[in-house]
Amino acid sequence: MPVPDMLRVLLIEDDPGDAFLVERMLTRGADGAFEVTHVAWLEEAIRRLRQDPFDAALLDLALPDTNGLETVSNLHKAMPGLPIVVLTGSEQEDLAVQVVKRGAQDCLLKGQVEGSVLRRALRYAMERKELTEQLVRQNEKLRELDRLKSEFISVVSHEMRTPITAMQVALTMLEEGPRDVQDPENKESMAMLRRNTDRLMKMTTDVLDVSRVESGGLQLQVQDVDILTLFRGVIDLTHPLARSKNDKLLISSEHQTLFVQCDPERITQALLNLVNNAITHNSGGIEITLGARVDRDGICVWVHDTGHGIPEEEQDRVFQPFYQVRSRKADVMCGSGLGLSITRGVIEAHGKELWLVSKPGKGCTFFFNLDPQVQRPMEVVRTCDWELTQMRAKGELYRFCARLSIAGRIGSQDHHAIREIVHDLIANWSNKLIVDLQDCTLIDSQGIGLLVEARARAMERGGKVVLLNPVASVRQALDLIGILDVIPTFVNLSAAFRALESSSSSRKEGTS
């Protein structure tokens, strides 16, 4: 913090002659302006300091209501953030050391200090005070980091020990001797290995995500997404766990579709954390509702449960890494305590805030907002249809891009024909092409090679190729080859439009 040009100094001195001289030295210097206020009693000084802001204090040790080193201690205790310079007539050898230990920044001897030295001492006192406070804050952060490190080691070692022990048991059973693949004990051992391998993988992923959140390295691929579709996906994934505890999973919205701008994978991760927490940390038989509505801040999304709720004194702490609210059912810790910290990081990476409303015994609701979909015109300028052996293709030309929709199988029988179609669209329609694979049921290696070739041809012409919503089997094939890492994929046409409309040669390929 820079020292201000005008310093407000409180002079605490009971001798009127000394006070007059000090005030003249401060106010008549050429190296900065000082505004001096004089009081004679420490009690009065503390009262003035609590009423008005002062930059520093000049303190005499011998006052009518206090004397000696206790004068420094009392003032520092009352105003710990105030820079203090002691001005005394005592020539005690170790006095300067003693007053600094009591909270002062400097000690000067009356009658032996000039105005320039006094003014410089006050400015240095302010700078030293600020540096000291910075060191204190840094030390507090280091202590907190050390505490979190110890807690992290304790939590992770404990959480990893359990699945590793279970895996050791399963491996021992498998090593005892050859068994039939269908042997019940063998199948159970394999299932145990799978469950605990998945558990370790999730824990490792959570730790990495927390690291990305804290370092600001959480990357998003923002698209226009139907939030209700994400809700249904989350319910599909959490239904087995909810059913095992007799919980009900519901969706609440007045809309059939409700498009938002978000990273679908990260928002799904956030919703999964919230739903899993509601299931895990409550007794069975509750209702968990995923809801969305339009409000003045965009699209409000919430996850509500009818469980135990979170005590008010713990609500600010539940978002801290590794912090856990004890389960009301068994009074034990559940999970690693990273889910809510990751969820908050995901929402904040979207530029939004995650908050909760809860009362013990009346459930808990987590809220966050997302930006709505940006509507864009989709007027078709030109169309063309092709009927091939195993597939149908349709071309559509828009103002700034073309779209090729493929239905059926992209196989060797139609490979040559579809290549000619793609090349014609890029050369004569637009160098920005959307390949719509939503109705494509299969793609072979030649078809994948065609996508790579189309991307290269479009780039040669300063354009771009993006993919639109491939079905799961096609997406898996593309992912295995690494196509999804180099060709952007979107879940709806509006998102693809926006990416192509805003793309340019200066932008990194794949940014949306």
Image: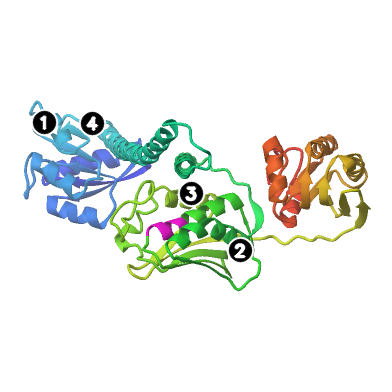
State which quarter of the image contains the N terminus. Answer: top left
Q: Check disc 4 and report the residue beneath it.
A: 114
Local SS, label 1: helix
* 223 vs 295, nearest the viewer: 223
Single out the mark in the foreground, 4 or 1.
1
Within-10-Å neighbours for mark 3: few <14, some 14–19, many 20+: many
Is residue 1 in sight in this rendering? Answer: no
Q: Check disc 2 and report the residue beneath it.
A: 228
Q: Check disc 1 and report the residue beneath it.
A: 95
Q: Check disc 3 and report the residue beneath it.
A: 345
Give the mark, 2 or 4, whose residue is nearer the N terminus: 4
**Going 33% across and 40% down the picture, which residue do you hit?**
158
* 226 vs 202, nearest the viewer: 202
Single out the mark in the foreground, 1 or 2.
2
The residue stretch that appears in magenta? 275-281
Give the mark, 1 or 3, whose residue is nearer the N terminus: 1
Give the mark, 1 or 2, whose residue is nearer the N terminus: 1
Local SS, label 3: helix
